[in-house]
Amino acid sequence: MKFIPKSTSSKTNIISTLKNFKVPHTYVIITTIIAISFIGTYIIPAGIYDRIQDPNSGRMIIDPTTFRYVTNTPVKFFSFTDHNLFTVLIRGLQATSEIVFFTFLVCGFFNMIQQTGAINAGIENIALIFKNKGLILIPVIMFIFSIGGVAIGMNTEAIAFVPLGVLLARALGFDAMVGMAMVALGAGVGFVGGFINPFTVGVAHSIAGLPIYSGIEFRIVVYIILYIVTVLYVIRYAYIIKNNPSKSIVFDLEIKQNSANLNIKNHNKYLKLTIRQKCVLLVLLLGFIALTYGVLKHSWGIEQLISIFMFMGIISSIIAKIPANTAANNFLNGAKDVVFGALAVGLARGILVVLEDGQIIDTILFYLSNKISALPGVISALLMYFVQIITNLFIPSGSGQAATTMPIMAPLGDMIGISRQTVVLAFQYGDGFTNYINPTAGGLMSYLAISQISYEKWVKWMAPLMMIWLLIGALAIIVAYYIGY
């Protein structure tokens, strides 16, 4: 009988356990967080700050001198008359109804366009042009979307481009993860590193009493670093699965979608588009031009974006002579494919519903800010960064988080010798990075719904990059502190 040392056997068991470990289902993850939040409403004392209007930005902000504990309002497990744990889902869906319906409708109308065959033919021709140079497109596409994030804080607006990104990525031999990443992380890098992002930097500077967009040079440098690192991360993954598709983290999804995927391996010449297909592509082009112009010039919201997709879907079906009943079924099939992700958006919002009902968000912020004030120097600056990361779980809105935290952090920085520019920097990166892994971020959940990527697989893929992002943010804050930024 062969003797196996105990330490070696234990090590083998641990490795085996890790290999067999499966990330829980998206709904299980979110439900677990809701349960923890529910318990937290019984453990954490309820507390509130008063809100006042900021004269600089006109926003309602916290008065940092007014925190007080109030009577606990723990969320009830069940009630016949009041809100309780089992009404969280419907209230979360009500609170996110705009983004949930946006997801359903955009995917439905986009499928109407796709069923004309024009998009597949057009993208297949583009893919042939870049047949052996698909990796070149990744930095180009990501840069275009990053500029949108920098200039207008593009986040949810980019969701409309995800279906095209996924189709193009698959046509080039990649997968849905690459397609989503090109759009979502392109816009994400711009949003996080946005040196002129009006919804984060602009609002934070206004509340902190700093000149709008001052200190831009330092933020540009960090943006460039973030862009390069993110592009390299996506390209590396794309290169791996191009050579070995089975290594795709969403390989099961790609197998499922295989019948609808574009395949350029056996094509050596361009497909000839029919007149009707060319007209459909023209409608698509004009629609996206109108969409981009509306967002940039008139600050269009979700309502206007949906109307553009509705126009493109209906007109494209008419041009392609698709019968009305078939067009209606095409719409329903497109919407049906994203039920899982769309419901996840509302379920995730339930986390905030529980925390708000229990009135513990302000208490958590008060407790964390007190901990910061007890430590001097660069450690305090890093703790500010950490507090913003934690706060972003409860307040995923950039401008909302600025209005909530900056009135506390700015004067706190003055007290412990941290410049207000560095305080804003801690907010900017603390708020931005985790939007791309945070289940309470409606934008992320909608991205995932449209690309049909599960949250758990996204987290598995995104985790290494998230760690790199967070490290870059921490190093940027350390440098900012020591150079007196």
Image (cartoon, helix red, strand yellow):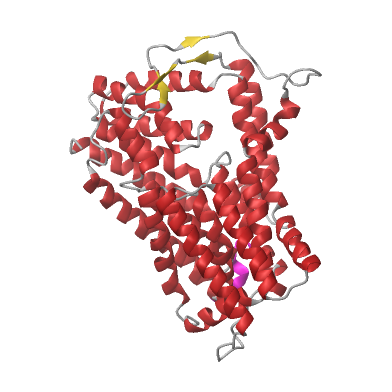
Is-magenta flag for residue 249? Answer: yes
Tell whether 208 sits left or right of 459. left
From this view, report whether residue 193 is shown above or below residue 55.
Answer: below
Q: Nearer the viewer, residue 128 or 3?
A: 128
Is-magenta flag for residue 176? Answer: no
Farthest residue in the bottom direction? 269
From this view, report whether residue 363 is shown above or below residue 140.
Answer: above
Residue at 34%, 25% (x, y): give it: 409
Q: Position of residue 337 (x, y in %)?
A: 72, 58
Q: Nearer the viewer, residue 464 or 71?
A: 71
Write down the quadrant of residue 402 in the picture.
Answer: top left
Q: How many marks?
A: 0
Q: Nearer the viewer, residue 384 or 342?
A: 342
Q: Position of residue 258 (x, y in %)?
A: 69, 72
Image quadrant in which the C terminus is located: top left
Residue at 45%, 73% (x, y): give it: 135
From this view, report whether residue 182 is shown above or below residue 473.
Answer: below
Residue at 27%, 51% (x, y): give it: 220
Query: In the rendered structure, which segment of residues is drawn in magenta?
Result: 243-250
Residue at 26%, 30% (x, y): give it: 420
Asked if residue 280 shows in the view, the reply is yes
Q: Position of residue 311 (x, y in %)?
A: 62, 61
Tell whether 50 sits left or right of 227. right
Asked if residue 8 shows in the view, the reply is no
Q: Position of residue 108 (x, y in %)?
A: 69, 59
Tell whether 410 sits left or right of 44. left
Image quadrant in which the N terminus is located: bottom right
